[in-house]
Image: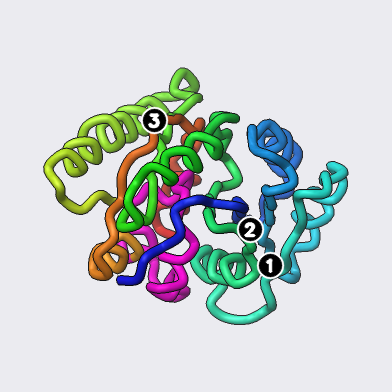
Amino acid sequence: MTGCRSTPRWCSVLVPLCREAAVAPQLVEALKLLDSPLQRLEIRFIVEEDDIATREALEATGLPAHMSVLAAPDGMPRTKPLALTIGLIKARGDLIAVFGAENRPDPRQLRLAANLIMRLPPEVACLQVRLVIDNCDDRFLARLFALEYAALFDVVNAGLIRTGLLNMLGGTSNPFRTAALHEIGGWDAWNVTKDADLAFRLARHGYGILDLPSDTLEEAPPDLPIWFRQRLR
């Protein structure tokens, strides 16, 4: 393992999207609230080249100067990890944060992550934020999701960290040291268990993952068909 610079000068936010035109306006508004110096922040929405609806929905919001749309070239595989790897190649930040279409991060999250990374040894490559279901009053399925997330982020991951065992990534809201991602080769475009795979490869290179005392709100699937497609994917 090689040492990684501790102090992030730039932060890059990667947001892979696929057929997400409907949520584009609320996503942009949520990310506008991030409390980080705009001259050191870039937010890239990564969309498929032929996903014109999502791209137009994003551009219709009047994206500020620090936000842009990055088209993923047409080809196989059409996966989230491939989109993230394309974003990694283009990223200027020393710190990279990943968000999903349904995420609403705490506005202070990036500032907290940058400040914490500065105080941690370079062997800590990533911080995992607590994901919280915010629509648990909607349906029984959403309440089950809320219980699952609470168990994972409040109990399981916390216990793994305190016992020095491998901590699994939650998929979004996990700021990385960019140098660590480059060292391990980024995301595996063909791996359907991309987050677990990334956590294991970081561990094999001698890196650790700690938690960040911050929340990201996320909506659970509203019904079983959507839940099934999500889990099948």
Distance (Cα) linking label 1 and label 3: 33 Å
Q: Position of residue 76 (x, y in %)?
A: 57, 80
Which callout, 2 or 3, points at the residue further toward the start of the chain? 2
Q: Position of residue 225 (x, y in %)?
A: 47, 46
On whether residue 205 falls in the magenta region, the answer is no
Q: Which residue is mark 2?
A: 18
Q: Which residue is mark 3?
A: 213
Callout 1 touching callout 3 (CB < 8 Å): no
Badge 3 element: strand
Q: Residue at x 50, y 45 (%)?
A: 226
Q: Nearer the viewer, mark 1 or mark 3?
A: 3
Region of the chain picked out in magenta, as a range: 169-197
Distance (Cα) linking label 2 and label 3: 29 Å
Using the image, tell me which numbered label, if any, was put on residue 48.
1
Callout 1 touching callout 2 (CB < 8 Å): yes
Badge 2 element: loop
Q: Position of residue 129 (x, y in %)?
A: 41, 38
